Image (cartoon, rainbow, N blue to C red):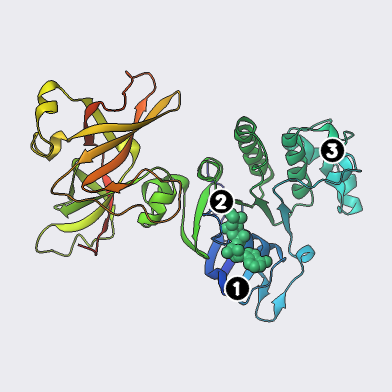
Amino acid sequence: MSRAGTGGDPPALLVRGAVRSFGSVRALDGLDLVVPAGSLLAVLGPSGCGKTTLLRAVAGFERLDAGEISVRGRTVAGPGVHEPPHHRRAAVVPQEGALFPHLDVARNVGYGLDHATRRSGRVAEVLALVGLEGYGHRMPHQLSGGQQQRVAIARALAPRPALILLDEPFTALDAGLRATLRREVREALLADGTTAILVTHDQDEALSMADLVAVQRAGRIVQVDAPHRVYSMPADPWVAGFVGEAALVRGWLGDGEVRTPLGTVPVTGTDVDLTDPAPGPVPVTVLVRPEQIELVPADAHCRMTPPGTGGGQESGRLARVVARDYHGHEVLVTLAVRDEDAALAANVPGPGAGSGTTVSGTELRARARVAGDRPALEIGDQVIARLRNAAKVWYDPSR
Ligand SMILES: Nc1ncnc2c1ncn2[C@@H]1O[C@H](COP(=O)(O)OP(=O)(O)OP(=O)(O)O)[C@@H](O)[C@H]1O
């Protein structure tokens, strides 16, 4: 459920043309971002793209070289303006909660609150929000790592800031706890109506927690969208490869359909102007997600048929299983598809998690998802791989 977009309120955060350089490195390179009040927005990007610099600039720990930042319609950074952190109403939750070790939980949470707020029961209220009712008298060392992080979040929530800035807050925790805590923190933020910005390089965290995902690359935001849109309608091939598993294959677009080495399918979205009549099929890059590949066992006939000659595009292509990653509920199999006429697309650009695409000669590699309860596929098995569902494509200027 999205909490974004409440009436005509100014956005909780507006960043316009933000520039911050360290020597020759432009950590922020004209960055624009709007965060609607009440939303939980994740800034997702590879290491070094400037996420922490953005967070620090918003919090007031970093000065901008150019551009401006406003919080709830009030300029806090810009030409001639640099408000100090404590005037910005932006609370930071660092990677490891950084609690005061000599203060109990209630004093940690109440630290810095004015007298009236402290007496209003706000400390108990936020502790209840993060599931730590009755923990007020514990000392930090008597808490688990996850509980300490929840106290840090309660402490950030307590003064009712305009913004909560979470800097990879779950990194230090083990995987099981991380999933639980993400859900609980999301619920706590939702219940308190807070606007939060979560900086992370973990795509699962961004996609599962946030209302909006802002993808950052080289000091700029390249797409802001709902998580399912970032995954299914990425702005460009780089985003496609960074968010989720992706293979980028060559195809030909014409008549609203795209012909690919794995079959012909309709198109869900493209930057090609479909109203502009092109003289022939347009060369495109096609996004193939693992769940879009359907696998059927190759029968003896298929096994004896040379690749590229066994049936039309619609019947898919003969593929070989070259790797498999077992995940219990599903298996990700890496397929090699020889394709003589459709030479293959370039590697997914960027250092992202979408490492599902490699190119070797005229061999396409793509990953397919198989339910864990299906008969196991072994390395070396032959299958027929067929693309199903509509695909997202981009014009390929290199052909
Ligand atoms: N104080 C600094 N002095 C010099 N260079 C810096 C400083 N802070 C950041 N940088 C550089 O700016 C770039 C962006 O860094 P930043 O820490 O913002 O990236 P990030 O996306 O948060 O990376 P990570 O996910 O690894 O934390 C990097 O090249 C980094 O080396």
Secondary structure, mark 3, is: helix
Residue assigned mark 2: 42
Q: Quadrant of residue 99?
A: top right
Q: Earlier in the sequence, mark 3 or mark 2?
A: 2
State whether residue 233 is above or below residue 325.
below
Q: Earlier in the sequence, mark 1 or mark 2?
A: 1
Q: Quadrant of ligand 1?
A: bottom right
Q: Is residue 225 visible?
A: yes
Residue found at x 83% / y 45%: 109
Apparent side of residue 214 relative to residue 119 in the rendered image (left or right): left
Q: CA distance from mark 1 to mark 2?
A: 23 Å
Q: Residues within 10 Å of mark 3 (few under 14, many from 20)?
A: many
Q: Which mark is residue 61?
A: none
Compared with 321, 56 (above or below) is below
The percent position of residue 46, horizontal first and vertical second, equals 52, 54
Residue 71 shows in the view: no
Q: Which residue is mark 3?
A: 140
Please name the residue that numbered disc 1 is placed on.
21
Dot 3 beta carbon under 8 Å from ligand 1 = no
Q: Are marks 3 and 2 in contact (CB under 8 Å)?
A: no
Q: Amino acid at mark 2?
A: Ala
Q: Position of residue 372 (x, y in %)?
A: 39, 22
Question: Alpha carbon of mark 3 to alpha carbon of mark 2: how far?
Answer: 28 Å
Of tags 3 and 2, which is closer to the observer?
A: 3
Quadrant placement of the C terminus: bottom left
Percent across and percent down for residue 246 are 36, 45
Left or right, 190 with reference to 392: right
